[in-house]
């Protein structure tokens, strides 16, 4: 049977790292020890107060659909969190609870993208964005970014790439794969560049809370005319629950509600009940301790990698990634990643997964592993070079 | 701020019943008793063995992403269920675990639908299908169906509506809102009509297991070249968990995996662990007792409604809905539904939510409420007419 595939499928790339992971699992099955530094999620469990909240909720067994926009009390809790933690006033009515930041991106893009509309996306960047744009028949245009601008796009770049078909810009701060931030002034300048051209700005704040040496913030402190994507996945340690949120400009909420009804019916009910405990002081204490742990890991790993010949010109200040230039070590990051697995049992993600901008020169190394394992990995890297 | 909305949003209808529900909640807040017969989900809690499985899993706290296609052991469990319960051989590799049947429909349609491609959909039918088609820039073409064919489309109708742009047909058995089934011969004839024209058949079996007086089955017993959508929502009582699955023809699986990675990353991990207990004999015992309860409710409600002047020409044999012609009682089902709420405190769903085919003549009445409440509702209906 020849499948009758939609044309979009030809443009959708898989997560390439999955192939590497399959190989890693094979080696593990043979008894080899693999240090995982390719994983894009915290290695910590979901904090106990959230587990407890979910478990308490489950004793009733009443796990029914909720409103499509999410439980009102959760939307209010998120609004309070914006206020108390970041000093941002966000009306709960603008907060749409979604199946992860993934669901938030689906809704924001479906609501705004006509066929042929172009979205500007920094490259390297989180790959799903461009594939979701493509899925709704939009066109993803890469803005190549490099260490000179800390892998973030500039207003000049936005202006240069803008066409009559450009719909807007998507940025992430902190960014995946580079861990770099946009500060308030940079965000204001990008917003101005986009809005002056009649476009829309989407800011992905999914790694909010995971910053080191600088405070986390939100564009919502000063802007109510942009979309903000967020999630319980990363800072809150809830990846597997599939829960995030979208903050939309008010005028979009009703339209997005309709899409949410049909795409998702409603976000996961147990996850929403778990998330009600996400902002409790006891949870935040746990999360802040983890943030310190991530900071320590970064502070250990970054100089150690540099010593091994990895070039990291733009200091990562957030998320849990180091995007390293490997040109002093190898010609092709994909082959290098294969060697790392086969020869010394270290898994990392080749640049290929993040776009077309010098992917073979870069490797994403995640510090989502215990400190001692990271140190062991560095030793193994040294062995590779010896 | 004028929102810059994608054109598709103008074609997406909300669930109209939500307005009615808001009014119902207002009345309830004023102390009025409302009998809910508009609800499209079982009134039963998730069976205890599944709650227990989820709770056990949660004690570890390790709620991480799973593979995009779902936990291998869950895909195998679903395959075994097809074999043991329905005598259908389905390779686990073809089973894609999704965020509800909703997620399964998103994937199947995104993988197969180019802009302008037409899908044939029975009207009345589940509304999200046509909105998901529209979202991926396909065109939903209604096949008006009525009681003469038990609200199911015929091969002749499919042939008559087919154009060079037609991509395929989506049917549901049992159907929402009508509760009617397609038998094996009818399904074979529909498949033949669709495949002969180079099209694709999607069969929504989400109400599988919820049939009364006839055994449940699956098209997968005899067909491996159609898409089958299913879910843990209805028979298994797991709506709020957001878990379903898609069975795809083998040649599509790899392409759908890519889409699943970007749309969803992975389905809910706690939900998948709960679902591992879905096929245990202790769970099935509970579910079969519920099925008996639904059968009793239908057997009580159907004659009682008929006595009240509701016309139900096509006997519903599945799901938990009665799609009643109200033309002997009122001229407009929407106004009638409003009167029902305001005057006697009964909530039901006007035909409007299910399409354009005589919606004002029909009301969907769900027996997702206790037997005594259903009887009380019938008394109230009698009062309305008195
Ligand atoms: C930048 C970015 N945005 C969005 C997501 C989606 O995450 P989720 O759907 O788990 O919230 C990810 C996940 O890795 C990410 O790195
Ligand atoms: C016919 C039909 N298909 C699909 C769905 C989607 O259900 P879920 O996403 O909860 O599996 C529903 C929900 O009511 C339905 O009635």
Image (tube, coloured by chain):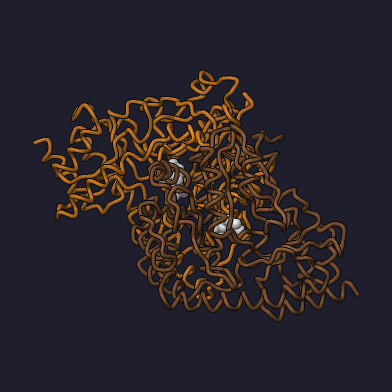
Chain colours: A orange, B brown
- Residue A211 visible to the viewer: no
- Residue A338 visible to the viewer: yes
Residue B177, how many percent across, how many down?
Answer: 67, 59
| Above or below: residue A118 compared with residue B227 | above
Q: Residue at image x 56%, y 68%?
A: B210
Which residue is outermost to the left? A386
Which residue is outermost to the right? B386
Instruction: Check the picture and name the quadrant holding the C terminus of chain A.
Output: top left
Q: Nearer the viewer, residue B358 or B195?
A: B195
Which residue is outermost to the bottom? B372
On the picture, is B191 further left or further right than B354? left
Q: Residue at image x 32%, y 53%?
A: A293
On the picture, is A8 further left or further right than B293? left
Q: Nearer the viewer, residue A358 or B214?
A: B214
Quarter location, residue A125: top left
Q: Nearer the viewer, residue A272 or B261?
A: B261
Residue B255, how many percent across, how many down?
Answer: 41, 41
Q: How many marks?
A: 0
On the picture, is A154 further left or further right than B375? left
Q: Residue at image x 35%, y 38%?
A: A316
On the picture, is A233 further left or further right than B120? left
Ligand 2 occupies quarter: bottom right
Instruction: Check the picture and name the quadrant holding the N terminus of chain A.
Output: top left
Residue A36, how many percent across, how many down?
Answer: 25, 49
Residue A76, how many percent across, how many down?
Answer: 62, 57
Q: Nearer the viewer, residue B181 or A221?
A: B181
| Above or below: residue B131 compared with residue B331 | above
């Amino acid at each position: 049977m020849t499948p009758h595939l939609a044309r979009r499928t030809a443009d959708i790339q898989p997560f390439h790292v999955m192939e590497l992971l399959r190989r890693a699992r094979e080696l593990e099955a043979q008894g080899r020890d693999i240090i995982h530094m390719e994983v894009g999620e915290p290695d910590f469990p979901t904090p106990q107060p959230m587990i407890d909240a979910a478990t308490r909720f489950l004793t009733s067994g009443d796990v029914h659909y909720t409103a499509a926009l999410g439980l009102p009390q959760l939307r209010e809790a998120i609004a309070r969190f914006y206020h108390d933690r970041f000093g941002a006033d966000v009306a709960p009515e603008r907060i749409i609870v979604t199946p992860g930041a993934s669901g938030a991106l689906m809704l924001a893009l479906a609501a705004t993208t006509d066929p042929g509309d172009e979205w500007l996306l920094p490259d390297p960047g989180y790959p799903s964005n461009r594939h979701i744009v493509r899925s709704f028949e939009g066109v993803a245009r890469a803005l190549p970014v490099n260490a000179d601008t800390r892998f973030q796009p500039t207003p000049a770049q936005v202006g240069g790439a803008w066409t009559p078909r450009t719909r807007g810009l998507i940025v992430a701060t902190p960014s995946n794969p580079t861990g770099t931030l946009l500060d308030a002034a940079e965000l204001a300048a990008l917003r101005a560049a986009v809005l002056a051209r009649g476009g829309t700005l989407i800011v992905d704040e999914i790694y909010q809370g995971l910053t080191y040496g600088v405070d986390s913030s939100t564009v919502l402190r000063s802007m109510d005319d942009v979309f903000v994507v967020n999630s319980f996945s990363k800072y809150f340690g809830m990846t597997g629950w599939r829960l995030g949120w979208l903050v939309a400009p008010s005028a979009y909420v009703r339209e997005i509600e309709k899409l949410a009804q049909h795409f998702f019916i409603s976000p996961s009910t147990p996850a929403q009940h778990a998330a009600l405990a996400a902002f409790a002081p006891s949870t935040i204490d746990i999360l802040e301790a983890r943030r310190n742990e991530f900071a320590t890991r970064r502070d250990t790993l970054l100089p150690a990698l540099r010593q091994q010949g990895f070039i990291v010109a733009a200091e990562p200040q957030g998320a849990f990634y180091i995007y390293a230039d490997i040109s002093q070590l190898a010609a092709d990051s994909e082959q290098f990643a294969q060697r790392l697995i086969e020869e010394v049992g270290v898994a990392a993600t080749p640049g290929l997964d993040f776009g077309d901008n010098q992917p073979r020169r870069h490797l994403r190394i995640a510090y989502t592993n215990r400190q001692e394992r990271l140190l062991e990995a560095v030793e193994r890297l040294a062995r590779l070079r010896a």
